[in-house]
Image (cartoon, rainbow, N blue to C red):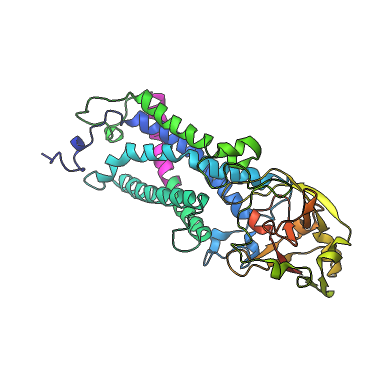
Amino acid sequence: MRDLRLPSSPGFWRSPLRGPHFTAVLGIVLLVGITVLFVTGLLSYAAYNPNLSPVNDMTPDKGILGFYLFSWPTNPHWLYRLNQGVHVTLGITLVPVLLAKLWSVVPRLFILPPARSLAHALERLSLLLLVGGALFQFTTGVLNVQLDYIFPGSFYTLHFYGAWVFFAAFVAHAALKLPTALRNLRGLRAARAEDNDLVPPSPAEPTVSRRGAFGLVGGASLLLFATSAGRSFDGPLRQTALLVPHGGPEPGSGPGGFQINKTAAYAAIGTRETAGDSWRLVVTGRGGVVRLSREELLRLPLHSAALPIACVEGWSTSDQWWRGVRLRDLAALAGYDDPGDVLVESLQQRGAFRRAALRANQVADPRSLLALDVNGEPLTLDHGYPARIIVPAAPGVLNTKWVARMTFGDL
């Protein structure tokens, strides 16, 4: 007889909540949710234009995992805002579901013998990879949203590789368990013995009903949704985002009183580098080199566009009115009537994405600007004074601030 004090003994796990139906419901929710997370994550990867490596995509040795999907579009202009808002908000909302699902299947991690058949062995292996991958992806994702970069290395690289390991295990596990989950949900016939290994042989007295447990998990998810989704909006809704750094009231008032990610102080940018007598924009292309002061840029044809800023952490602003010189006009100054790619370099000396590349379709869009003003006033230093990039539907890190140099041509 097995020692009931050991987790490998069925009698060790006595919660009456565990069972095929409880696990199946949570599994179906995660099946849909994680599929959406993977698709939106892959689209987020595409938005960085990974084929412009090693500028935008610095993932080492990615091989076929780094396949390039397509040139990221500029229409609709809120595309990245929607994609990343769904990706991050859904990920946070699913945390209670994931934890409940892991709790519901934890007895299976201790089953002896380790494998009853080849299919069972594959299921156990996929389960271990799935649990480890899920904890890694959700933990690093939440830390990134909270701007707590305590993990070693680049979040971009870690999350990229972790996503593929996790999703491969997820697909394998779903393929093995989906028929059982559907059978348990439909209740068409009794589950096989191996499908009932979550049912305790001698359950303890219930302290909450199964319906109450579902309510607890669903309520926790709704609470996380309600206290995080608002950072994708401006105004009163942002103040409901209590659990994320970019929630709460706007950082200031006036034309520049909207959210930013990194301040000028963080980037070590001051008035010495941006003063009118020292700053020049260097535009390079096959037509040579052109150096332009801010005053000279203001004398060029200026255009306006209403565009948001959206970041990988899931926060975004509503449309702001930007005014500046079209990127395609700067490309023409550099000798390109048919705009090509552009490499944009910032005055910033440290941190990621000091350099960023934009595709030809982004340069050619008439709303893509080297912005000089926002909401009717000159840019503030925190918003990128004396000049910054703003491109429709592009991730925030590609909207380079404190622009110093632009090099046009095929990258």
Horizontal relation, residue 212 to residue 224: left or right: left
Q: Quadrant of residue 220?
A: top left
Q: Residue at x 70, y 66 (%)?
A: 271
x 65%, y 47%: residue: 252
Pick the residue in front: 344 or 233. Answer: 233
**In the orientation shown, which residue stands out farthest toward the bottom?**
288
The number of callouts visible is 0
**Residue at position x 46%, y 53% from top?**
140
Which of the two residues, 380 or 202, is positioned nearer the viewer here?
380
Give x and y (percent) for residue 375. Answer: 77, 48
Q: Quadrant of the N terminus?
A: top left
Left or right: where 107 falls relative to 24: left
Verify whether residue 176 appears in magenta. Answer: yes
> What residue lies at 67% left-to-right and 47% top-to-bottom?
258
Residue 236: give x, y in percent of width and height: 63, 35
Q: Is residue 411 visible?
A: no
Majority secondary structure of magenta residues: helix
Estimate the x, y position of residue 290 in percent, counting from the top left: 83, 73
Q: Is 90 located above or below residue 147 in the figure? A: above
Taking the view exactly as shown, the residue that stands out farthest to the left is 1
Task: Say whether residue 241 is magenta.
Answer: no
Tell me: residue 343, above or below residue 315. below
Q: Quadrant of the C terminus?
A: bottom right
Residue numbers of the magenta segment? 171-187
Front one among 234 and 398 = 234
Q: Is residue 340 visible?
A: yes
Where's residue 59, x and y in %? 54, 64
